[in-house]
Amino acid sequence: MVIADDEPPLLIDEWQLVPEVWNTVRDLVDQELVPGRFILTGSAPVKETHSGAARMTNVRVRPLTLPERGICSPTVSMRTILAGQSPKLTGRSSLTLADYVDEIISGGFPGMRHLVGRAHTAQMNGYLERIVDHDLAETGFTVRRPAAVRAWMAAYAAATGSTASWEKIRNAATAGYDAKPAKETTAAYVELLTALRIIDPIEAWIPSSNHFSRLGSAPKHYLADPALAARLLKRTKDHLLKGDEGPVRIPGDGTLLGGLFESLAALSVRTFAQAAGAEVFHLREHGGAHEVDFIVENQTGVLGIEVKLAGAVDDKDVRHLAWLRERIGNRLVDSMIITTGPQAYRRPDGVAVVPLALLGA
């Protein structure tokens, strides 16, 4: 393999198909430490490789955020808010609820953005079928019943934005059937689909302080893109706008559209937080008395974010953020509610109200 003399930066896509690439790049980096010389991209894990410690850095690449799709111009900077500057918020968005649903359905995969209608549906179906029929096999997992895997993925999609137990998801995947897949089998689905970057859960926040005593530890469920969830559940724009959630249900609070909009928000929040050197978690007390959709944490402190599928915000919508401030005080650098509304502004209590289309890095 002759790559040493290629003009940098050199992008090697799907490097895992030729695993020797990893060690070759490692050796070349040892010979000449030039940052950004090689970019290795891949969609499947390879276990039998050197860790790359002190030579390579892992960067999670997610589907396109709304600004990256070219449909909006953000006016609210995640980096500035995380710096604790409490900036004045301005900007107006023209996106409506129907526009956000369009983006949920279309997704942020660059290669599919130009497709509409049946062509887009066929491409999404093909992508999901490849995950089950090809990608899982590449990891060494034997898929004996592809339909069972697809049913489990659809049930997981129905749990989007929730902390539903794995047992509830397993039951939803096999509703009407006496025989259920073994827990060990579904645990393998979780592990492998997470490694393949298809499942993208947000872990629970476990703060180092003792201000909380009843926090849950279950992850919040998301797929890599809400478009995958919509397609797994065979939901169209009309279905979502009419509240038709389909036959796969997970008992819990909220609507499917609410969960999918939260997933769209999670895509942006995680991408912008990563660019700012921050991590994203969620917070939920046992029993659900208090919960905060996203906890964005860096060395400065914590940004609490709630997501609301509506354009208007009232006092009831900020109660969990007020509770969070009571618990952690000055550690909370700012509070935000992400909405589908038109205007970015600050409430009299200081909470930032930001349309998703106006949030940027």
Image: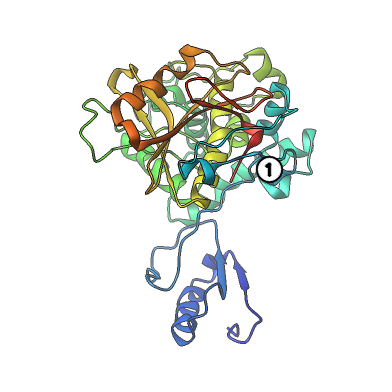
Q: Specify the quadrant of the image occupied by residue 108.
A: top right
Q: Is residue 39 left or right of residue 329?
A: right
Per the image, the residue denoted by label 1 is: 67
Q: What residue appears at the point 48 percent right and 37 percent down from the top-left corner? A: 149
Q: Is residue 240 left or right of residue 263?
A: right
Q: Identify the image's colour scheme: rainbow, by chain, secondary structure or one colour.
A: rainbow
Between 143 and 323, the residue placed more toward the observer is 323
Q: Position of residue 92 (x, y in %)?
A: 71, 29
Task: Give the residue type that dot 1 points to.
Answer: Pro
Dot 1: element? helix
Q: What residue appears at the point 54 percent right and 56 percent down from the top-left corner? A: 43
Q: Residues within 10 Å of mark 1 (few under 14, many from 20)?
A: some
Q: Position of residue 341 (x, y in %)?
A: 65, 22
Between 90 and 185, the residue placed more toward the observer is 90
Q: Is residue 181 left or right of residue 315?
A: left
**Residue 222 in view:** yes
